[in-house]
Image (spheres, coloured by chain):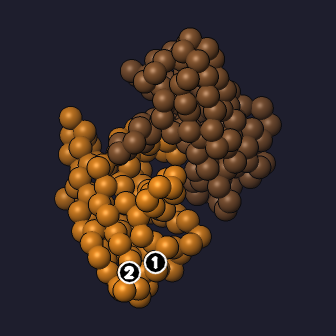
Chain colours: A brown, B orange
């Protein structure tokens, strides 16, 4: 199972919106609505930001939103803030009943 | 307060074995799928294995099949990972992570991790 493909880096200015893509196949992202997104600050454990493609856990800012089209899922961060600077990882359920993470995207707030 | 506390990591030679443990508290352990996720230094997370609430289903990433075994003891609120035939590429921080009740493929709580180093 290959890792899902994410851009290595995305940047934006405070207040702007950015979108991170996560590309898989019909055997994972495209086949199930079980795509999640995690935020990881340096030295910290990953934090769940989005589950089931577009659902936010309690306590996660509504500036974070998720979507999916075909084999590609996306995470959008609106109103970018300095504390959003972190690594972001997508993950998906697969047809083998396993899970796979993405390659990760470093978000930089300019 | 939900807590997951891993233990059992350390330095081991290639070909050796280790048994990791994860002690859970603050929730009804037997109601949840639980996972092991690892993260090599400077790399992204890699899902390793998971186990159903009653232990009847277990799944593994291909690279550890036949070498690692996940298990749980609901009476002790504990999760385990028996790791045999360890390789250098197994070096990583190992986390236990709880699946959501509605979507066990998403992890809402993670432990702080235990470091496994495989080196001669």
Cβ–Cβ under 8 Å for marks 2 and 1: yes
Name which residue lies at 44% across and 39% down.
A40
Q: Earlier in the sequence, mark 2 or mark 1?
A: 1
Residue holding disc 1: B88
Give the total of numbered labels. Answer: 2
Chain letter of disc 2?
A: B
Residue B33 position, x and y percent, is: 41, 50
Q: Secondary structure at mark 2?
A: loop
Using the image, name the chain to which the residue with label 1 belongs.
B
| Number of other residues with Cα within 10 Å of mark 1, as a class: few under 14, some 14 to 19, many 20 or more | some
Q: Quadrant of the C terminus of chain B?
A: bottom left
Instruction: Tell me if residue B74 comes above or below residue B60 in the rendering.
Output: above
Which element is circle 1 on?
helix
Residue A67 % position (x, y): 68, 27
* Image vertical order of residue A91 relative to residue B65, above or below: above
Q: Can residue A21 be seen in this snapshot?
A: yes
Residue hosting label 2: B119
Disc 2 crowd rating (10 Å Cα; few below 14, some 14-19, many 20+) is some
User: Residue at (45%, 61%) from the top-left corner?
Assistant: B40
Q: Quadrant of residue A14?
A: top right
Residue at 38% across, 77% down = B118
- Which image quarter holds the N terminus of chain B? top left
């Amino acid at each position: 199972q290959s890792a899902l493909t994410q851009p290595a880096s995305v940047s934006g200015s405070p207040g702007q919106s950015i979108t991170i893509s996560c590309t898989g196949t019909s055997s994972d992202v495209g086949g199930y609505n079980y795509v999640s997104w995690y935020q990881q600050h340096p030295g910290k454990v990953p934090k769940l930001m989005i589950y089931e493609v577009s659902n936010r856990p309690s306590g996660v800012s509504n500036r974070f939103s998720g979507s999916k089209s075909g084999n590609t899922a996306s995470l959008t961060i609106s109103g970018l803030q300095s504390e959003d600077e972190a690594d972001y990882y997508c993950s998906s359920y697969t047809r083998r009943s396993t899970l796979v993470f993405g390659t990760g995207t470093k978000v930089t707030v300019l | 307060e939900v807590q997951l506390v891993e233990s059992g990591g350390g330095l081991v030679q290639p070909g050796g074995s280790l048994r990791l443990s994860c002690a859970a508290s603050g929730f009804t352990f037997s109601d949840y799928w639980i996972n092991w996720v690892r993260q090599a230094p400077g790399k992204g997370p890699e899902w390793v294995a998971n186990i159903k609430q009653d232990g009847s289903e277990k799944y593994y990433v291909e690279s550890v099949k036949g070498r690692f075994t996940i298990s749980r003891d609901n009476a002790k609120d504990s999760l385990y990972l028996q790791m045999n035939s360890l390789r250098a590429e197994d070096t990583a921080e190992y986390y236990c992570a709880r699946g959501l009740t509605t979507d066990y493929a998403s992890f809402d709580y993670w432990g702080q991790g235990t470091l496994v180093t495989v080196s001669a």
